[in-house]
Protein backbone atom coordinates (compact mmCIF):
# COMPACT_ATOMS: atom_id res chain seq x y z
CA UNK A 1 0.00 0.00 0.00
CA UNK A 2 1.21 3.50 -0.82
CA UNK A 3 0.07 6.81 0.63
CA UNK A 4 -1.02 8.11 -2.78
CA UNK A 5 -3.78 5.48 -2.87
CA UNK A 6 -5.36 6.69 0.38
CA UNK A 7 -7.60 9.77 0.12
CA UNK A 8 -8.04 12.14 3.05
CA UNK A 9 -11.21 10.46 4.28
CA UNK A 10 -12.12 7.93 6.95
CA UNK A 11 -10.91 5.30 4.50
CA UNK A 12 -7.31 6.09 5.44
CA UNK A 13 -7.99 4.74 8.95
CA UNK A 14 -10.13 1.80 7.86
CA UNK A 15 -7.47 0.71 5.38
CA UNK A 16 -4.92 0.20 8.17
CA UNK A 17 -7.43 -1.87 10.12
CA UNK A 18 -8.19 -4.03 7.10
CA UNK A 19 -4.49 -4.57 6.47
CA UNK A 20 -3.72 -5.68 10.03
CA UNK A 21 -6.91 -7.74 10.17
CA UNK A 22 -5.73 -9.57 7.05
CA UNK A 23 -2.28 -10.07 8.60
CA UNK A 24 -3.83 -11.58 11.73
CA UNK A 25 -5.99 -13.86 9.59
CA UNK A 26 -2.91 -15.07 7.71
CA UNK A 27 -1.26 -15.76 11.08
CA UNK A 28 -4.30 -17.84 12.09
CA UNK A 29 -4.01 -19.88 8.88
CA UNK A 30 -0.31 -20.53 9.50
CA UNK A 31 -0.97 -21.64 13.07
CA UNK A 32 -3.76 -23.97 11.99
CA UNK A 33 -1.56 -25.47 9.28
CA UNK A 34 1.30 -25.88 11.74
CA UNK A 35 -0.88 -27.56 14.36
CA UNK A 36 -2.44 -29.97 11.87
CA UNK A 37 0.80 -30.82 10.10
CA UNK A 38 2.84 -30.88 13.32
CA UNK A 39 0.39 -33.15 15.09
CA UNK A 40 0.40 -35.63 12.21
CA UNK A 41 4.20 -35.57 12.01
CA UNK A 42 4.76 -36.05 15.73
CA UNK A 43 2.24 -38.87 15.91
CA UNK A 44 3.72 -40.66 12.85
CA UNK A 45 7.31 -40.39 14.12
CA UNK A 46 7.04 -40.46 17.90
CA UNK A 47 3.50 -41.60 18.63
CA UNK A 48 2.83 -38.29 20.39
CA UNK A 49 -0.27 -36.29 19.56
CA UNK A 50 1.25 -33.06 20.84
CA UNK A 51 0.90 -30.60 23.65
CA UNK A 52 -2.59 -29.29 23.24
CA UNK A 53 -2.09 -27.10 26.28
CA UNK A 54 0.16 -24.85 24.19
CA UNK A 55 -2.27 -24.32 21.32
CA UNK A 56 -3.73 -21.17 22.85
CA UNK A 57 -0.32 -19.72 23.67
CA UNK A 58 0.95 -20.36 20.13
CA UNK A 59 -2.21 -18.96 18.56
CA UNK A 60 -2.23 -15.69 20.55
CA UNK A 61 1.54 -15.27 20.18
CA UNK A 62 1.11 -15.48 16.40
CA UNK A 63 -1.53 -12.73 16.54
CA UNK A 64 0.76 -10.50 18.60
CA UNK A 65 3.60 -11.01 16.11
CA UNK A 66 1.34 -10.32 13.12
CA UNK A 67 -0.05 -7.10 14.63
CA UNK A 68 3.22 -5.66 15.96
CA UNK A 69 5.31 -6.51 12.92
CA UNK A 70 2.56 -5.57 10.47
CA UNK A 71 1.88 -2.20 12.12
CA UNK A 72 5.50 -1.02 11.83
CA UNK A 73 5.92 -2.50 8.36
CA UNK A 74 2.74 -0.79 7.16
CA UNK A 75 3.81 2.55 8.61
CA UNK A 76 7.19 2.28 6.91
CA UNK A 77 5.58 1.39 3.60
CA UNK A 78 3.23 4.38 3.72
CA UNK A 79 6.09 6.71 4.65
CA UNK A 80 8.27 5.40 1.81
CA UNK A 81 10.84 3.85 4.15
CA UNK A 82 13.35 1.28 2.94
CA UNK A 83 12.71 -2.44 3.18
CA UNK A 84 15.45 -2.68 5.81
CA UNK A 85 13.65 -0.10 7.98
CA UNK A 86 10.34 -1.95 7.72
CA UNK A 87 11.78 -5.40 8.46
CA UNK A 88 14.09 -4.10 11.18
CA UNK A 89 11.65 -2.09 13.25
CA UNK A 90 8.85 -4.57 12.61
CA UNK A 91 11.08 -7.29 14.06
CA UNK A 92 11.90 -5.08 17.06
CA UNK A 93 8.18 -4.64 17.77
CA UNK A 94 7.57 -8.38 17.49
CA UNK A 95 10.55 -9.22 19.71
CA UNK A 96 9.19 -6.91 22.41
CA UNK A 97 5.58 -8.01 22.19
CA UNK A 98 5.74 -11.77 21.65
CA UNK A 99 8.19 -12.83 24.45
CA UNK A 100 6.51 -10.45 26.90
CA UNK A 101 3.12 -11.92 26.11
CA UNK A 102 4.36 -15.52 26.32
CA UNK A 103 5.88 -14.94 29.75
CA UNK A 104 2.87 -13.06 31.13
CA UNK A 105 0.47 -15.67 29.67
CA UNK A 106 2.30 -18.53 31.39
CA UNK A 107 2.36 -16.63 34.68
CA UNK A 108 -1.32 -15.81 34.30
CA UNK A 109 -2.17 -19.45 33.63
CA UNK A 110 -0.26 -20.56 36.72
CA UNK A 111 -1.96 -17.90 38.81
CA UNK A 112 -5.40 -18.93 37.50
CA UNK A 113 -4.74 -22.58 38.37
CA UNK A 114 -3.53 -21.58 41.83
CA UNK A 115 -6.56 -19.39 42.57
CA UNK A 116 -9.14 -21.77 41.08
CA UNK A 117 -10.09 -25.10 42.61
CA UNK A 118 -11.99 -26.29 39.52
CA UNK A 119 -10.86 -29.54 37.96
CA UNK A 120 -11.98 -28.24 34.57
CA UNK A 121 -8.64 -26.49 34.13
CA UNK A 122 -6.97 -29.87 33.64
CA UNK A 123 -8.87 -30.29 30.35
CA UNK A 124 -6.93 -28.65 27.47
CA UNK A 125 -10.16 -28.46 25.43
CA UNK A 126 -11.73 -25.98 27.85
CA UNK A 127 -13.10 -22.98 25.94
CA UNK A 128 -14.83 -21.08 28.75
CA UNK A 129 -14.22 -17.36 28.38
CA UNK A 130 -13.96 -16.97 32.14
CA UNK A 131 -10.55 -18.65 32.10
CA UNK A 132 -9.33 -17.38 28.72
CA UNK A 133 -10.30 -13.70 28.84
CA UNK A 134 -7.05 -12.85 30.61
CA UNK A 135 -5.03 -14.36 27.75
CA UNK A 136 -6.83 -12.25 25.13
CA UNK A 137 -6.39 -9.08 27.18
CA UNK A 138 -2.70 -9.82 27.68
CA UNK A 139 -2.31 -10.37 23.94
CA UNK A 140 -3.84 -6.96 23.22
CA UNK A 141 -1.79 -5.27 25.93
CA UNK A 142 1.53 -6.64 24.70
CA UNK A 143 0.62 -5.97 21.06
CA UNK A 144 0.11 -2.32 21.96
CA UNK A 145 3.19 -2.15 24.17
CA UNK A 146 5.47 -3.72 21.57
CA UNK A 147 4.17 -1.43 18.84
CA UNK A 148 4.43 1.83 20.80
CA UNK A 149 7.89 0.89 22.13
CA UNK A 150 9.20 0.20 18.62
CA UNK A 151 7.67 3.43 17.28
CA UNK A 152 9.29 5.44 20.07
CA UNK A 153 12.66 3.81 19.46
CA UNK A 154 12.38 4.43 15.71
CA UNK A 155 11.56 8.11 16.32
CA UNK A 156 14.49 8.50 18.71
CA UNK A 157 16.84 6.80 16.24
CA UNK A 158 15.68 9.12 13.46
CA UNK A 159 16.36 12.17 15.63
CA UNK A 160 19.85 10.95 16.46
CA UNK A 161 20.51 10.30 12.77
CA UNK A 162 19.48 13.84 11.81
CA UNK A 163 21.66 15.24 14.60
CA UNK A 164 24.68 13.21 13.50
CA UNK A 165 24.18 14.08 9.83
CA UNK A 166 23.28 17.78 10.00
CA UNK A 167 24.31 18.81 13.50
CA UNK A 168 20.83 20.22 14.22
CA UNK A 169 17.94 18.93 16.26
CA UNK A 170 15.25 17.20 14.25
CA UNK A 171 11.92 19.04 14.05
CA UNK A 172 8.53 17.91 15.38
CA UNK A 173 9.68 16.93 18.85
CA UNK A 174 6.64 15.53 20.64
CA UNK A 175 5.47 16.89 23.99
CA UNK A 176 4.95 14.71 27.05
CA UNK A 177 1.20 15.02 26.55
CA UNK A 178 1.46 13.69 23.00
CA UNK A 179 3.65 10.83 24.17
CA UNK A 180 1.22 9.95 26.92
CA UNK A 181 -1.68 10.03 24.48
CA UNK A 182 0.22 7.72 22.11
CA UNK A 183 0.89 5.23 24.91
CA UNK A 184 -2.75 5.39 26.02
CA UNK A 185 -4.11 4.79 22.51
CA UNK A 186 -1.81 1.82 21.94
CA UNK A 187 -2.39 0.12 25.30
CA UNK A 188 -6.08 1.02 25.46
CA UNK A 189 -6.61 -0.01 21.85
CA UNK A 190 -4.87 -3.32 22.49
CA UNK A 191 -7.05 -4.07 25.53
CA UNK A 192 -10.18 -3.15 23.55
CA UNK A 193 -9.07 -5.39 20.67
CA UNK A 194 -8.43 -8.29 23.04
CA UNK A 195 -11.80 -7.86 24.73
CA UNK A 196 -13.84 -7.66 21.51
CA UNK A 197 -11.90 -10.51 19.91
CA UNK A 198 -12.47 -12.74 22.94
CA UNK A 199 -16.22 -12.10 22.69
CA UNK A 200 -16.22 -12.97 18.99
CA UNK A 201 -14.17 -16.11 19.74
CA UNK A 202 -16.46 -17.26 22.56
CA UNK A 203 -20.00 -16.35 21.50
CA UNK A 204 -20.54 -18.61 18.45
CA UNK A 205 -19.41 -21.69 20.36
CA UNK A 206 -21.44 -20.85 23.45
CA UNK A 207 -24.73 -19.85 21.85
CA UNK A 208 -26.35 -22.36 19.52
CA UNK A 209 -28.27 -19.58 17.74
CA UNK A 210 -24.93 -18.27 16.45
CA UNK A 211 -23.96 -21.61 14.95
CA UNK A 212 -22.38 -23.57 17.78
CA UNK A 213 -19.06 -23.66 15.88
CA UNK A 214 -15.72 -23.93 17.70
CA UNK A 215 -13.43 -23.62 14.68
CA UNK A 216 -14.32 -20.62 12.51
CA UNK A 217 -14.82 -18.22 15.46
CA UNK A 218 -11.06 -18.23 16.02
CA UNK A 219 -10.61 -16.95 12.46
CA UNK A 220 -13.20 -14.22 12.98
CA UNK A 221 -11.60 -13.29 16.30
CA UNK A 222 -8.21 -12.99 14.59
CA UNK A 223 -9.58 -10.59 12.00
CA UNK A 224 -11.36 -8.54 14.68
CA UNK A 225 -8.22 -8.42 16.83
CA UNK A 226 -6.02 -7.18 13.99
CA UNK A 227 -8.66 -4.81 12.64
CA UNK A 228 -9.30 -3.03 15.93
CA UNK A 229 -5.57 -2.78 16.65
CA UNK A 230 -5.03 -1.26 13.22
CA UNK A 231 -7.76 1.35 13.66
CA UNK A 232 -6.90 2.35 17.24
CA UNK A 233 -3.11 2.08 17.43
CA UNK A 234 -2.06 4.60 14.82
CA UNK A 235 -3.61 6.79 12.18
CA UNK A 236 -2.03 8.45 9.18
CA UNK A 237 -0.99 11.94 10.38
CA UNK A 238 -2.66 14.98 8.87
CA UNK A 239 0.82 16.39 8.24
CA UNK A 240 1.28 13.77 5.52
CA UNK A 241 -1.28 15.66 3.40
CA UNK A 242 -1.06 19.12 1.86
CA UNK A 243 -3.76 21.54 0.77
CA UNK A 244 -4.56 22.45 -2.84
CA UNK A 245 -7.05 24.78 -4.49
CA UNK A 246 -8.91 23.19 -7.41
CA UNK A 247 -10.88 25.22 -9.94
CA UNK A 248 -14.37 23.93 -10.80
CA UNK A 249 -15.29 26.76 -13.16
CA UNK A 250 -15.53 25.55 -16.80
CA UNK A 251 -13.06 28.13 -18.11
CA UNK A 252 -10.18 26.73 -16.07
CA UNK A 253 -11.68 23.46 -14.87
CA UNK A 254 -9.29 21.09 -13.11
CA UNK A 255 -6.49 23.61 -12.54
CA UNK A 256 -4.86 23.00 -9.16
CA UNK A 257 -2.37 25.08 -7.20
CA UNK A 258 -0.70 24.05 -3.92
CA UNK A 259 -1.12 26.30 -0.90
CA UNK A 260 2.44 25.69 0.31
CA UNK A 261 5.32 24.19 -1.64
CA UNK A 262 7.89 23.69 1.13
CA UNK A 263 5.85 22.98 4.30
CA UNK A 264 6.13 26.58 5.48
CA UNK A 265 3.55 29.28 6.16
CA UNK A 266 2.15 30.68 2.91
CA UNK A 267 -0.75 32.61 1.41
CA UNK A 268 -2.29 32.12 -2.03
CA UNK A 269 -4.29 34.96 -3.60
CA UNK A 270 -7.23 34.50 -5.96
CA UNK A 271 -8.60 37.12 -8.34
CA UNK A 272 -8.58 38.40 -11.94
CA UNK A 273 -5.64 40.79 -11.64
CA UNK A 274 -3.33 39.31 -14.32
CA UNK A 275 0.02 40.08 -12.71
CA UNK A 276 1.42 38.22 -9.73
CA UNK A 277 -1.69 36.43 -8.47
CA UNK A 278 -1.26 32.80 -7.48
CA UNK A 279 -4.56 31.71 -8.99
CA UNK A 280 -5.84 33.80 -11.91
CA UNK A 281 -9.46 33.52 -13.05
CA UNK A 282 -11.08 35.53 -15.88
CA UNK A 283 -12.70 38.86 -15.01
CA UNK A 284 -16.03 37.80 -16.49
CA UNK A 285 -16.45 35.08 -13.86
CA UNK A 286 -17.63 37.53 -11.20
CA UNK A 287 -14.28 38.03 -9.48
CA UNK A 288 -12.66 41.14 -8.12
CA UNK A 289 -9.03 41.92 -8.90
CA UNK A 290 -8.11 40.63 -5.44
CA UNK A 291 -11.01 38.50 -4.26
CA UNK A 292 -9.85 36.09 -1.53
CA UNK A 293 -6.83 34.24 -0.24
CA UNK A 294 -6.03 30.90 1.41
CA UNK A 295 -3.50 30.85 4.25
CA UNK A 296 -1.61 27.96 5.85
CA UNK A 297 0.39 28.37 9.07
CA UNK A 298 3.37 26.40 10.33
CA UNK A 299 1.10 23.91 12.11
CA UNK A 300 -0.68 23.04 8.85
CA UNK A 301 -4.00 24.81 9.57
CA UNK A 302 -5.73 26.17 6.46
CA UNK A 303 -7.84 29.34 6.45
CA UNK A 304 -9.68 31.26 3.73
CA UNK A 305 -10.04 35.07 3.91
CA UNK A 306 -12.52 37.27 2.10
CA UNK A 307 -10.75 40.29 0.59
CA UNK A 308 -13.53 41.73 -1.58
CA UNK A 309 -16.91 43.33 -1.03
CA UNK A 310 -18.21 41.00 -3.75
CA UNK A 311 -19.81 37.68 -2.85
CA UNK A 312 -17.56 35.11 -1.14
CA UNK A 313 -19.26 32.02 0.32
CA UNK A 314 -17.84 28.85 1.83
CA UNK A 315 -20.22 25.93 1.58
CA UNK A 316 -19.96 22.62 3.43
CA UNK A 317 -22.63 20.15 4.57
CA UNK A 318 -25.21 21.93 6.76
CA UNK A 319 -23.18 25.14 6.84
CA UNK A 320 -22.73 28.28 4.73
CA UNK A 321 -20.27 31.01 5.71
CA UNK A 322 -20.35 34.51 4.18
CA UNK A 323 -16.84 36.03 4.02
CA UNK A 324 -17.78 39.22 2.17
CA UNK A 325 -15.37 41.95 3.24
CA UNK A 326 -16.88 44.57 5.56
CA UNK A 327 -15.05 47.94 5.22
CA UNK A 328 -16.13 48.83 8.74
CA UNK A 329 -14.10 45.98 10.21
CA UNK A 330 -10.36 46.32 10.92
CA UNK A 331 -9.59 42.91 9.37
CA UNK A 332 -11.15 40.60 6.79
CA UNK A 333 -13.39 37.72 7.83
CA UNK A 334 -11.89 34.25 7.70
CA UNK A 335 -12.81 30.64 8.43
CA UNK A 336 -11.00 27.34 8.72
CA UNK A 337 -11.05 25.17 5.62
CA UNK A 338 -11.93 21.48 5.65
CA UNK A 339 -11.58 18.76 3.07
CA UNK A 340 -13.84 19.31 0.01
CA UNK A 341 -15.10 22.73 1.11
CA UNK A 342 -16.50 24.74 -1.81
CA UNK A 343 -15.58 28.44 -2.18
CA UNK A 344 -18.16 30.31 -4.29
CA UNK A 345 -17.05 33.66 -5.71
CA UNK A 346 -19.14 36.44 -7.30
CA UNK A 347 -22.61 37.81 -6.65
CA UNK A 348 -24.22 35.02 -8.65
CA UNK A 349 -21.64 32.44 -7.56
CA UNK A 350 -20.17 32.31 -11.08
CA UNK A 351 -16.79 30.94 -9.95
CA UNK A 352 -16.31 27.90 -7.78
CA UNK A 353 -13.20 26.57 -6.08
CA UNK A 354 -12.68 23.41 -4.07
CA UNK A 355 -10.23 22.87 -1.22
CA UNK A 356 -8.73 19.38 -1.22
CA UNK A 357 -6.05 17.65 0.83
CA UNK A 358 -3.77 15.41 -1.22
CA UNK A 359 -0.84 13.18 -0.15
CA UNK A 360 2.44 15.03 -0.08
CA UNK A 361 4.75 14.42 -2.97
CA UNK A 362 7.66 13.75 -0.59
CA UNK A 363 7.69 13.09 3.16
CA UNK A 364 10.42 14.48 5.34
Image (spheres, rainbow, N blue to C red):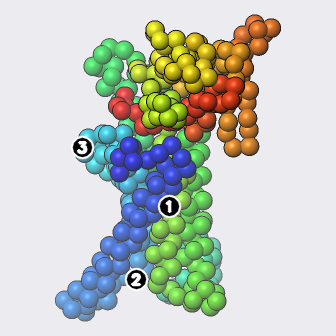
Q: Is 87 situated above or below 339? A: below
Whether residue 105 sits left or right of residue 339 in the image: it is left
- Near mark 1 (Cα within 10 A), the count class, few <14, some 14-19 or many ≥20, is many
Per the image, the residue denoted by label 2 is 52
Task: Quadrant for residue 40, please give it.
Answer: bottom left
Tell me where residue 224 appears, x and y as whole percent. Answer: 52, 66
Q: Secondary structure at mark 1?
A: helix
Per the image, the residue denoted by label 1 is 227
Q: Are marks 1 and 3 in contact (CB under 8 Å)?
A: no
Mark in front: 1 vs 3: 1
Q: Is 252 situated above or below 306? A: below
> Does label 2 or label 1 sit earlier along the sequence?
2
- Near mark 2 (Cα within 10 A), the count class, few <14, some 14-19 or many ≥20, is few
Mark in front: 2 vs 1: 1
Tell me where residue 345 appears, x and y as whole percent. Answer: 63, 26
Quadrant containing the C terminus in the rendered view: top left
Whether residue 228 sits left or right of residue 50 in the image: it is right
Per the image, the residue denoted by label 3 is 84
Q: Nearer the viewer, residue 256 or 68?
A: 256
The residue depicted at 57 percent of the width and 39 percent of the height is 340
Q: Secondary structure at mark 3?
A: helix
Residue 40 visible from this viewpoint: yes
Mark 2 to mark 1: distance in Å? 27 Å
Q: Secondary structure at mark 2?
A: helix
Amino acid sequence: MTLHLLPYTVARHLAIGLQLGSAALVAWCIVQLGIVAGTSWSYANFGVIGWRELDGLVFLSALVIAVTFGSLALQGGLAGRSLRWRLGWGSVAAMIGAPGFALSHMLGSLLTEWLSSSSLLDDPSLVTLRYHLLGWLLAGFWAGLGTVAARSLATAAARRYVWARDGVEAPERRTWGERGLSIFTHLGGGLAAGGFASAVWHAPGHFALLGGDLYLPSAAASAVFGGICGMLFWGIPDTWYEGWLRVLTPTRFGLRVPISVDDTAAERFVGHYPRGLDLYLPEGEGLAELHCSVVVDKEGHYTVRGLSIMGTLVRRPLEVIDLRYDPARPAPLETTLRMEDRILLGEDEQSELEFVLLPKRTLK
